């Protein structure tokens, strides 16, 4: 049987921990996106525009989320927690290790999870 993907573990973990009593959980996205003024151009003008593409004037990146923060964040009975989800081969990046240290120092519960069962077990421990 093929191991579950990181995306599958993340999605299923979110569903599982959200179903626990006294728990509020959400997906925490981080990354970069682009914004600007959309330029409308027909196919073949100056740039070859393909279906689904956008051209932006004055394009600028927008960073969102706290680098290194957990994939899932939540609160259970007043305790803040963060779960970093990885598949069987995934490794924590340095920014994720720094977030873990700061989060735990502030009193939060942090765990690196590689399965839905482990994610649920960590949060059940707060009940």
Image (spheres, grey):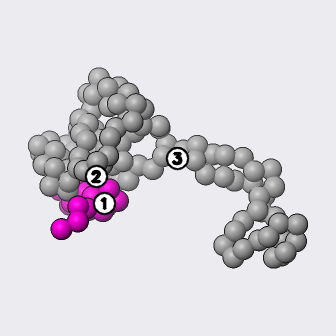
How crowded pointer 3 is (Cα within 10 Å; few <14, some 14-19, many 20+) is rated as few
Quarter of the rendering containing residue 37: bottom right
How far across and down, in percent of the image, does residue 45 sit? Answer: 88, 71
Residue 16 lies within the magenta run: yes
Give the quarter of the figure containing the N terminus.
Answer: bottom left
Asked whether residue 55 appears in the rendered view, the answer is yes
Q: Between marks 2 and 1, how big is the CA–CA gap?
A: 6 Å
Residue 13 lies within the magenta run: yes
Q: Which residues are magenta?
A: 1-21
The residue positioned 75% from the left and 54% from the top of the image is: 36
Q: Which residue is mark 2?
A: 87
- Camera-nearest residue between 96 and 25: 96
How far across and down, in percent of the image, does residue 8 sit? Answer: 30, 62
Q: Nearer the viewer, mark 3 or mark 1?
A: 1
How far across and down, in percent of the image, does residue 31 sit? Answer: 52, 46
How crowded pointer 2 is (Cα within 10 Å; few <14, some 14-19, many 20+) is rated as some
Mark before the other along the chain sequence, 2 or 1? 1
Quarter of the rendering containing residue 96: top left
Q: Are dots 2 and 1 in contact, CB under 8 Å?
A: yes
Q: Which residue is mark 3?
A: 31
Kindly state the secondary structure of the residue where label 3 is placed.
strand
Q: Which residue is mark 1?
A: 5
Give the quarter of the figure containing the C terminus.
Answer: top left
Q: Between marks 2 and 3, how big is the CA–CA gap?
A: 19 Å
Main SS category, magenta section: helix
Q: Is residue 116 left or right of residue 45?
A: left
Kindly state the secondary structure of the residue where label 1 is placed.
loop
- Please, is residue 120 above or below residue 53 in the view? above
Q: Which mark is residue 88?
A: none
Mark before the other along the chain sequence, 2 or 3? 3
Q: How many marks?
A: 3
């Amino acid at each position: 049987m093929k191991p579950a993907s990181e995306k599958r573990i993340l999605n299923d973990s979110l569903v599982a921990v959200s179903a626990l009593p006294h728990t509020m959980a959400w997906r925490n996205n981080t990354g970069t996106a682009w914004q600007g003024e959309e330029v409308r151009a027909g196919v073949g003008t100056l740039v070859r525009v393909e279906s689904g593409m956008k051209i932006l004037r004055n394009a600028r990146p927008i960073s969102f989320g706290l680098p290194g923060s957990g994939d899932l964040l939540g609160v259970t009975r007043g305790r803040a927690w963060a779960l970093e989800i990885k598949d069987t081969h995934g490794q924590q990046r340095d920014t994720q290790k720094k977030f873990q240290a700061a989060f735990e120092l502030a009193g939060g519960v942090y765990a690196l999870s590689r399965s839905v069962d482990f994610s649920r077990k960590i949060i059940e421990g707060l009940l």
